[in-house]
Every structure is written in C-alpha cells, then in structure tokens.
C-alpha cells in the first residue's frame, strides 16, 4: 500500500479530448508536499508516513511544531496529515513528492472538507420537496412539515432531518480519474469535482476499489531532500603511482 499526498485545490477548468468532448477537471497543486516524519511498528505500534504541505511562517507556529519541523529539516508546513502504508512503502524524511506519483487514467480517492453553508432549511439541506404551492398552504411552502408523533412517544427522535448546519464535513469522493499530470509545475488534474473550497487542502490516495496501475512508481514519485541532493559525490580514490628503481614514474 502506497502513501497518498496532500494537495491544494486551485479551482476548476476544462479540456477537450481527442473526440472534441468537453472534460471538466479540477486542478490540484502539491504545494511542497514533503515527508515530515515516519511512524514505525517498533516505536509507534503502526506504520505510516506524516506528510506536510503549504508554507507557514515560523513565528506563527507553536514551539513544539517548530522543533518537529527542525528535526526533520523541512520548512514549517501549513497542514500535516498521516497516511498508513506498508513496511516497504516508507519514504525517507524530507523527500518531496512530484506529480508523477500518480499516472494518467489512474483511479484515486479524494478526501476534503466540504464548503460550509451555515444554517440551512430542510429543503436545501435534505432536498425535501416542500409543501403544496396552492390552496390550503399559507406562507409555509418551504417548511419541512411535521416532525413528531402523538403523545406516544411524545418527542422528536434524534437525527431527524430538519433545518440546521450544512456543510463543513469530511467527505470522500471515490474512483476519480486522473486526467493529466504536470511534473514541472507540480499539478494533478482530475476529472470532475472534488470536495472542498478553492484554496483548501485535500488528501489524494490510490483508490481502494480499483487496482493500482503497473506503471505507478513504488514507493512513490519523489525527489530527494535538498541537502542530500546538494551533497557532492564522493571522490574516487586515486590509484597509487608506480615508480621504478631510479625514482622516476613509469
């Protein structure tokens, strides 16, 4: 099982496929998604990767999290989340994910927080049909109707569909198709809509109901940490120069 990634929802646009059909897509940006910690069976009791994405000023971060990011040698992140993985799915701390972690045509599951709508009526919240808009109904066409019974049980049951807070819930949309990936700009384009508002972060992981494509990179599409990439390659040891009896080089 591979890890998922944290991506920032930039908005929606559209493309036209080879047949000229209109394809609406959502644009997701990896936004500096990096591994910030590992969770191992011996130390933590389970196997997972903690990822961070986005940028956050160090002065706005708590002292504990500043120390956490400092230990991992990564910049403070706007959001962190964990993804369960297999033992062979662990990735080094500091590695940054690239858009080719997913391949075009792959199915993914995307989790996000839905847009908050505030207090909403029963028709908008639960899609009720409303009352008759004709004789006998006076200024209550969009009411939800009766909510209780008679003296027995004499109450309104819990979880009754009524007016209340709408949105701001965790939602997962499954089996979304990856339309295209842009490695240079770190963009993942997926077909259709995904939960969440523009500028919010979502979790993108391999679909649990579909098989992983054979060409998908394992343990993931990553680029190594900057410190490791900038380190010079070790110089090869020079062979000793042989000399003859007269002291000259052969």
Image (cartoon, rainbow, N blue to C red):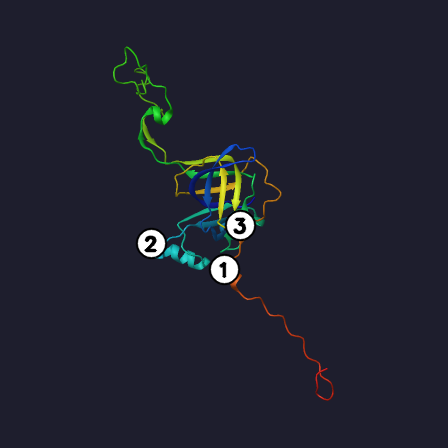
Residue at 73% in and 89% down? 246
Marks 1 and 2: in contact by CB < 8 Å? no
Residue at 65% in and 74% down? 238
Residue 226, numbered label: 1
Q: What separation in Å lies between label 2 and label 1 (alpha carbons)?
A: 24 Å
Q: Say if 170 sits above or below 154 in the image.
A: below
- Residue 171 position, x and y percent, is 43, 35
Give the crowd class for mark 1: few <14, some 14-19, many >=20 residues within 10 Å.
Answer: few
Q: What separation in Å lies between label 2 and label 3 (alpha carbons)?
A: 32 Å
Seen from the viewer's position, the closer of residues 117 and 17 is 17
- On the picture, is 73 further left or further right than 133? right
Of badges 2 and 1, the one in the foreground is 1
- Residue 205 position, x and y percent, is 51, 42
Task: Tell me the quarter of the image containing the N terminus.
Answer: top right
Task: Tell me the quarter of the image containing the C terminus.
Answer: bottom right
The earlier-in-sequence mark between 2 and 3 is: 3
- On the picture, is 171 further left or further right than 242? left
Q: Secondary structure at mark 3?
A: helix
Q: What separation in Å lies between label 1 and label 3 (alpha carbons)?
A: 28 Å
Q: Secondary structure at mark 1?
A: helix
Residue at 52% in and 32% down? 21
Seen from the viewer's position, the closer of residues 91 and 47 is 91
Residue 41, numbered label: 3
User: Which residue is identified by label 2?
Assistant: 60
């Amino acid at each position: 099982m591979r890890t998922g990634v944290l991506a920032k929802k930039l908005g929606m646009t559209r493309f036209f496929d080879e047949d000229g059909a209109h394809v609406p897509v959502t644009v997701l940006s990896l936004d500096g998604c990096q591994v910030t910690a590992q969770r191992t069976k011996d130390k933590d009791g389970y196997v997972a990767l903690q990822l961070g994405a986005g940028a956050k000023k160090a002065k706005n971060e708590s002292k504990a999290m500043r120390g956490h990011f400092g230990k991992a040698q990564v910049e403070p992140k706007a959001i962190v989340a964990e993804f369960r993985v297999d033992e062979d799915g662990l990735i080094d701390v500091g590695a940054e994910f690239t858009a080719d972690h997913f391949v075009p045509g792959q199915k993914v599951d995307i989790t996000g927080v839905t847009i908050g709508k505030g207090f909403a009526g029963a028709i908008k919240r639960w899609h009720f049909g409303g009352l008759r808009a004709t004789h006998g109904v006076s200024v209550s066409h969009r009411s939800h109707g009766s909510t209780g019974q008679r003296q027995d049980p004499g109450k309104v049951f819990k979880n009754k569909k009524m007016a209340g807070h709408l949105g701001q819930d965790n939602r997962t949309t499954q089996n979304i198709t990856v339309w295209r990936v842009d490695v240079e700009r770190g963009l993942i384009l997926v077909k259709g809509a995904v939960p969440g508002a523009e500028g919010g972060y979502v979790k993108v992981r391999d679909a649990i109901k579909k098989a992983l494509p054979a060409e998908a990179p394992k343990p993931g599409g990553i680029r190594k940490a900057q410190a490791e990439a900038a380190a010079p390659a070790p110089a090869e040891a020079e062979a000793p120069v042989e000399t003859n009896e007269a002291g000259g080089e052969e």
